[in-house]
Amino acid sequence: MRAAVRTRPARGESLALLGGAPVGEVRAPQWPRFTMRQIERVAQLLHTGETVVIGRRGVVEEAERAIAAYHPGKRVLLLNSGFSALHAALMGLEIGPGDEVITTPYTFGATTSCILFAGAVPVYVDVDPVSGLIDPRKVAAAITPRTRAILPVHLYGQPADMPALQRIARRRGLAVIEDGSQAHGATIQGQPVGQFSDAAGFSCMGGKILATSEAGYLLASKDEVYWRAALMCQHWGRRGEAGFPAELGPHADTLIASYRVSPLIAALFPGQLAKMPAEIEGRRANARAFREAMKGVEWIEFPAHRPGFSSSHHMLTFNYLEERTGVPRAAMLRALQAEGAPVFVYVREPLHRLRRLRWKGYRGPRPFWMEQLRRAKADYGRVSLPACERKVERSVEIVWNFYRPDGRAMQRLAECFHKVGRHLDALRSLQSEEKTR
């Protein structure tokens, strides 16, 4: 049963920001975490000097087999980052100069930079203003004769609407590339993300749900996409691997992007995958408990739960409704942080507003992609994406590495919000004082 929440300040209670006692820091367990068996395996590789693997063998093969078991029917290419995986997906699909890729402006920049590194042009469409996920309704209108692919992001662990995007792609003959870097274990109708596309890229750096150190992997639905990607970013294109197409033999050389993974990191994958399902269930249980405990906080807006769509909760995102409090978001974050809530803002600027995408009048260090954007007449300064702007202005996040069910911690986290809500008058007065200083 949810504990009753007071709506008025208790006698003697005051905000931590004003010298009162804080609710108390809410800290997730250490992340990433590794078993002693994983640590010993890495130590063994160091003792034997096995710090480089060319091709698919040893711990790299073991890791790829473990990933493939989680993503049935997909070819797996283990790489050194999530960016590498997305770049490999584009190269495997032979997307390059002159091509356009429709994607989201509300995410980390690697989803755009992989398109730029392929020589292609990102085309931004608007997002849902609460979840921040790409809006399929905006995709069809953005398709041109130059469009080759749609690249959605499963942001914060929330699955994008892949069924809708697949329908659009099939009608228009486009490829689909999923960015699952923040969403290992998220599902749509019971199927994990990564299963709904021609290719998918995942990050496995130490902050992600499938956490190692720095790594990533490509999923390919077709053998030819896998082999073309391998040809572009692995020494000799893995030509010693069973099934290597004979017709690619003359093209296997050292003209590559060296995206191979360290075996020291590859050795971590089987163990991390084995315990990931239980950790995701812990994340989900805590998210449910927190949202239940947040009832009554009317100035926070959570994304709606969609039937059949299940987040794996890399982060928890919600919108702060300043119009209901009269307190600017920055001041609200300060008050919540002072009480012990680990809140922050993840996306501070939409990607289409970044300076290094503005070829008109740009005066900074010159990125190589400026010329391709100029030739394509990609004028992002004229792009209007109001829902994205709204999400950027209102969004607040919590890194959700709460992988063990912990109802008390969730109650304490919610109490940080309830307490600040009981002292909105004091917070507004503080803001007025600070403005007049």
Image: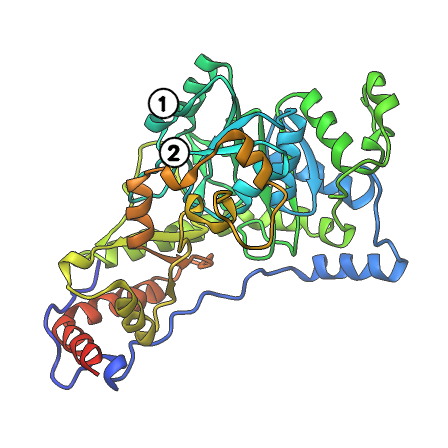
Q: Which residue is mark 1?
A: 141
As drawn, 65 above or below 146: below
Residue 426 on image: x %, y %: 15, 77
Is residue 201 at least partly visible in the picture?
A: no
Tell me where residue 415 sits by quadrant: bottom left
Q: Name which residue lies at 52% across and 40% down.
A: 180
The residue at the far front in this view is 361
Amino acid carrying label 2: it is: Val
Tell me where residue 413 sits by quadrant: bottom left
Q: Quadrant of the N terminus?
A: bottom left
Q: For this view, does 371 lie left or right of residue 431?
A: right
Circle 1 Cα neighbour tier, 10 Å, few/some/many (<14 / 14–19 / ≥20) = few
Residue 159 on image: x %, y %: 42, 37
Residue 393 on image: x %, y %: 30, 53
Circle 2 Cα neighbour tier, 10 Å, few/some/many (<14 / 14–19 / ≥20) = many
Q: Name which residue lies at 39% across and 42% down.
A: 381
Amino acid carrying label 1: it is: Ala
If you read the primary sequence from the N terminus, does the residue marked by circle 1 or circle 2 appear first? 2
Per the image, label 2 sits on a secondary structure element best described as loop
Residue 183 on image: x %, y %: 49, 43
Per the image, label 1 sits on a secondary structure element best described as helix
> Contact (CB < 8 A) between labels 1 and 2?
yes
Q: Which residue is mark 2?
A: 125
Q: Which mark is residue 6?
A: none
**Measured Cα–Cα span from mark 1 to mark 2:** 9 Å
Question: Which of 24 and 235 lies nearest the eye of the viewer?
Answer: 235
- How many callouts does the rendering have? 2
Question: Which of 46 and 420 lies nearest the eye of the viewer?
Answer: 420
